[in-house]
Image (cartoon, grey):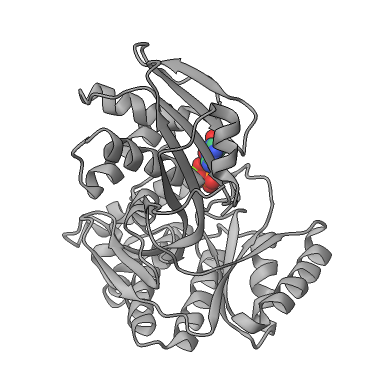
Amino acid sequence: MKANLQQEFLNKYNTRATAAYFSPGRVNLIGEHIDYNGGLVMPCAITFGTFLLVAPNKDGVFRFKSLNFNEEAEVSLNDEHKKSGEVWYNYPLGVISYFENEGKELQGLDMLFYGDIPIGSGLSSSASIEVVTSYALNDLFNGGYDKLSLVKLSQNVENKFIGVSCGIMDQFAVAFGEKNKALKLDCNTLDYEAVDSNLGDYVLAIINTNKPRKLAESKYNERVQECQTALAALQQELDIKFLCDIDTQTFNQHKHLITDSIVQQRAQHVIEENDRVKLAAKALSENNLAEFGQLMYASHDSLRDLYEVSGKELDAVVEYAKTNTDVAGARMTGAGFGGCAIALVKGNAFDKFSQDVTAYYTDKVGYAPSVYSSLIGDGVGVLNEPVKS
Ligand code: ADP
Ligand code: MG
């Protein structure tokens, strides 16, 4: 963490922060394009995240500052709180507005945010800032919410206040994440299992393609639509609510019902990927990183060939990874078309991996990626002695 956050707080607000909180970002280890198909995903919290330092004030205002953005704001406690344009502080403002609409009593608060997650790269800095804010408000003003309620209200802020229709996985992962555990989560029922995920001498490499995200949203909606078409076709014979209600074997017996070959391909990815999550959870919990790595590669290949949501940038990372014997596995993570890939890399070989993947990628793509080393970290919480100057 940035060592001088308390000093930054003091410079800005002329007083010391009275409390500090941290919420991580997340990666999805496996289980991609599954959340809207009623299946299993397996995200984990990473060791990058968002810090929030606070001090209550008697001025009846909320003050927002982030070290990641230039705009600052001061908003009266009594005003009606509405989204304004595209500024970053809509995120904490949305959380405040939610608490107020629920009749929670708030007081004025000076806030300083700082995130070391690459922002806008698919590592969910948005869920991180939502959850850190809702966790802090709940703690400071006795909101009375349990963690799952904080997850749901944070998602609600992103959906309704910000206007981004995301599922619940991101907020769930950053809130419930645990060190060295992956979360095998059913996005539909919210049943989850914290799977032992000791990476041993491996680290989680995160490779940001640095590709500007453009097509992602329209293609995403197209895939959601294709899955609905596939489901409707299968429902002619099967009594199911979601594609992931069946396994690969059952799918193979009924796939002829899906007449469009592209739509059939999409469904095949979803159903096989859901089965892969179960195998991956087992492999991880048995410390079988070699097997887990192979499942990562299989996931990537399926996303590239069957679901067609990869791209030359994400493919370049995985192509390189397959040539490096210090890598157990790699795949794109998130919705695709850009964003990040992840790789399981031997810790002592990370620096070389970072250099070599950068060279390979730059040669193929024409610009450099950013490469980070992470571990599986804890979810949102209060920092005990976080804010030394
Ligand atoms: P992602 O969630 O993939 O990082 P999003 O576009 O969903 O990308 O969310 C990024 C937005 O979240 C930023 O543009 C900003 O508005 C807000 N945000 C995230 N982290 C911070 C931060 N540390 N300080 C201020 N705003 C932040
Ligand atoms: Mg986001």
Q: Relative to 19, does residue 314 appear above or below in the rendering?
A: below
Residue 350 x/y as whole percent: 66, 77
Residue 181 x/y as whole percent: 36, 71
Give the farthest residue toward the left.
Answer: 239
Residue 162 in view: no
Q: Residue at x 28, y 74 (%)?
A: 253
- From the viewer's side, name the closer residue of 262 and 380: 380
- From the viewer's side, name the closer residue of 366 and 388: 388
- Residue 85 falls in image quadrant: top right
Side of 109 relative to 87 (left or right): left
Q: Relative to 352, does residue 369 appear above or below in the rendering?
A: above
- From the viewer's side, name the closer residue of 382 and 247: 382
Q: Residue at x 29, y 24 (%)?
A: 106
Side of 364 relative to 285 (left or right): right
Q: Residue at x 56, y 34 (%)?
A: 10
- Residue 79 falls in image quadrant: top left
Give the farthest residue toward the top.
Answer: 79
Residue 95 in view: yes
